[in-house]
Amino acid sequence: MIILNIIRGMFMAFADSVPGVSGGTVAFVMGFYNKFIDSINVLTSRNSLETKKEALIFLIKIGIGWIMGFILSILFIASIFERHIYEISSLFIGFIIFSIPLIYKEERQTISGHVGHLIYAIIGFVVVILITYFNPTSQSEGISMSLNNFSLGMALYVFIAGAIAISAMVLPGISGSTLLLIFGLYAPIISSIKEILTFNFTPLPLILCFGIGIIVGILSVVRLISRLLKTRRSELIYLIFGLMIGSLYAVIMGPTTLDTPHAPLTLQSFSFIFFLIGGLVILGLEKLKLICSQNNNKKEA
């Protein structure tokens, strides 16, 4: 089981490392989503020491695999990111656009009859546009704040982004990488982690802030999101729709956040082939999810 859980963690990391693909979906397809979420809830709530120990051991195994998978993903993505930024951006747009109708299909009953909650989608969309336009990594205004330039404001921004991005592990259909794109931190975080892996520790202080944000997010934000999914699910789903639609703008502006800024994605630089590949990956994962769900229902019957 140790090897199996490490492999599970690696596949989750492969999914989490790209926008539009949720590690939670992979966990569901591989049949351990409920145990994963339950283990997190056990650690963040009042339970016996023995129960917490069991949950912690399971999460450590998943975590080891996740770290291994994430490092491999980072090395691969960083190696092709700058050279093929427009193809990769087109791929991400495919991931996101094809994910939206699938989330609607999954949550149709939840949002049915709650048209008034559409305001949350509008809020989510506007928030993404504002964050993307005014984020401190933006190169468009001539106020560049590279992850290599440590400052209190930048450290706080990265900390908050880490805490919010990790909440995606319990959000349906949205990945932490999508949230990092919204904050304008996807490309900088990817390149900074690669720098550290190649023993250039210049961006280490801010990456540590990002890591601390993730830990705080697991202990607080994830718990809050889990509660909201039970008490305010419709509002939260509409908010997710707004975030995802708005994240398309973040992807378009993504090339401007590279260490060597590129022009935003345009119709001329857009790759329809990579867009379709992204869509096919999402549809393939959804098909696998349905097959696994049907098999589970047959076993229970």
Image: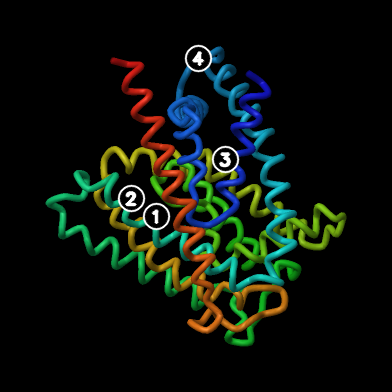
The numbered dot on residue 48 is 4
Residue 190 visible in rendering? yes
Q: Which residue is mark 1?
A: 99
Near-viewer residue (187 or 212): 187
Under circle 3, the secondary element is helix
Q: Which residue is mark 2?
A: 103
Under circle 1, the secondary element is helix
Q: Is residue 205 left or right of residue 11?
A: right
What residue type is disc 3 on? Met
Total marks drawn?
4
Task: Tell me whether circle 1 and circle 2 mark residues in contact (CB < 8 Å).
Answer: yes
Q: Residues within 10 Å of mark 1 (few under 14, many from 20)?
A: many
- The quadrant in which the N terminus is found is top right
Q: Earlier in the sequence, mark 4 or mark 1?
A: 4
Question: On screen, 32 above or below 251?
Answer: above
Q: Please state which of the two labelled residues, at mark 4 or mark 1, is closer to the viewer.
A: 1
Q: Earlier in the sequence, mark 3 or mark 1?
A: 3
Residue at x 70%, y 67% (from the top left corner): 147
Question: On screen, 149 above or below 26?
Answer: below
* Coordinates of residue 49 in the picture (x, y in percent): 55, 15
Question: On screen, 299 above or below 78?
Answer: above
* Marks 3/1: CA–CA distance: 17 Å
Near-viewer residue (40 or 7): 7
Near-viewer residue (252 or 276): 276
Residue at x 50%, y 26% (from the top left corner): 39
Q: Which residue is mark 3?
A: 12
Task: Tell me whether circle 3 and circle 1 mark residues in contact (CB < 8 Å).
Answer: no
- The quadrant in which the C terminus is found is top left
* Coordinates of residue 71 in the picture (x, y in percent): 72, 47
